Image: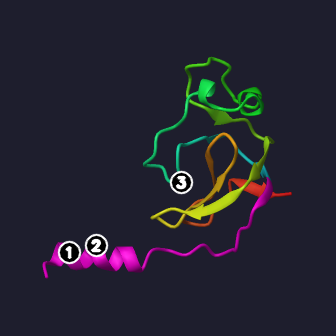
């Protein structure tokens, strides 16, 4: 095995685990957050027009072709919780995925 192969193998099986357990439910955005296609920053940010009507109302920018970003204090229902490859925690809302907690433990959304 090559050194690069071993390194990627190690990273895959030893990805960081969240310090706190997160579960489905209603969350409130602490600071503006982008809405993405899937869990992880490597996925595309959705456009405002791609969100549900409720999601569009809660966007920072009202331009339909702008990147979708939820305003601070927006409430959303996480129907699924997913941990990305880098260890960050994401909630799946009806409009898309929102980062709840970074890989370093910074909380972007609070459960209410």
SS of the residue at dot 1? helix
Query: Residue 90 occupies which quadrant of the picture?
Result: bottom right
Query: Residue 23 occupies which quadrant of the picture?
Result: bottom right
Q: In this view, does 96 lie above or below 82?
A: above
Of the 4 image quadrants, the one containing the N terminus is bottom left
Task: Report if the CB atoms under discs 2 and 1 are less than 8 Å apart.
Answer: yes
Q: In this view, does 40 lie to the left or right of 7?
A: right
Q: How many labels does the image show?
A: 3
Of the 4 image quadrants, the one containing the C terminus is bottom right
Name the outermost residue toward the right.
Answer: 112
* Residue drawn at the location 62% of the way across and 43% of the way down: 96
Q: Is residue 74 above or below residue 99?
A: above
Residue 106 seen in the current view = no
Q: Label 1: few (<14), some or many (≥20) within 10 Å?
A: few
Let me know if residue 103 is in the magenta part: no
**Residue 29 percent location from the top left of the image:** 75, 47
In this figure, which residue is indicated by the disc labeled 3?
Answer: 39
**Residue 31 percent location from the top left of the image:** 70, 44
**Residue 73 percent location from the top left of the image:** 81, 42
Q: Is residue 23 above or below residue 57?
A: below
Q: Label 2: few (<14), some or many (≥20) within 10 Å?
A: few
What is the C-alpha distance between the residues marked 2 and 3?
20 Å
Of residue 68 and residue 54, the one placed in the foreground of this image is 54
**Mark carried by residue 33:** none
Q: Which of marks 2 and 3 is in front?
A: 3
Task: Report if the CB atoms under discs 3 and 1 are less than 8 Å apart.
Answer: no
* Residue drawn at the location 61% of the way across and 32% of the way down: 68
Instruction: Indicate which disc, 3 or 1, sits on the residue closer to the N terminus.
Output: 1
In this figure, which residue is indicated by the disc labeled 1?
Answer: 5
In this figure, which residue is indicated by the disc labeled 2?
Answer: 8
What is the C-alpha distance between the residues marked 3 and 1?
25 Å
* Residue drawn at the location 73% of the way across and 35% of the way down: 71
């Amino acid at each position: 095995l090559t050194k690069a192969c071993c390194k990627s193998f190690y990273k895959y099986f030893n990805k960081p685990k969240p310090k706190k357990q997160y579960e489905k439910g209603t969350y409130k955005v602490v600071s503006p957050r982008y809405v993405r296609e899937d869990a992880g920053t490597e996925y595309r940010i959705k456009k405002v027009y791609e969100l549900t009507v409720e999601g569009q109302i809660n966007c920072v920018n009202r331009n339909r072709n702008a990147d979708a970003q939820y305003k601070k204090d927006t409430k959303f229902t996480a129907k699924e919780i997913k941990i990305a490859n880098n260890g960050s925690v994401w909630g799946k809302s009806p409009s898309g995925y929102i980062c709840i907690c970074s890989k370093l433990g910074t909380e972007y959304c609070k459960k209410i």
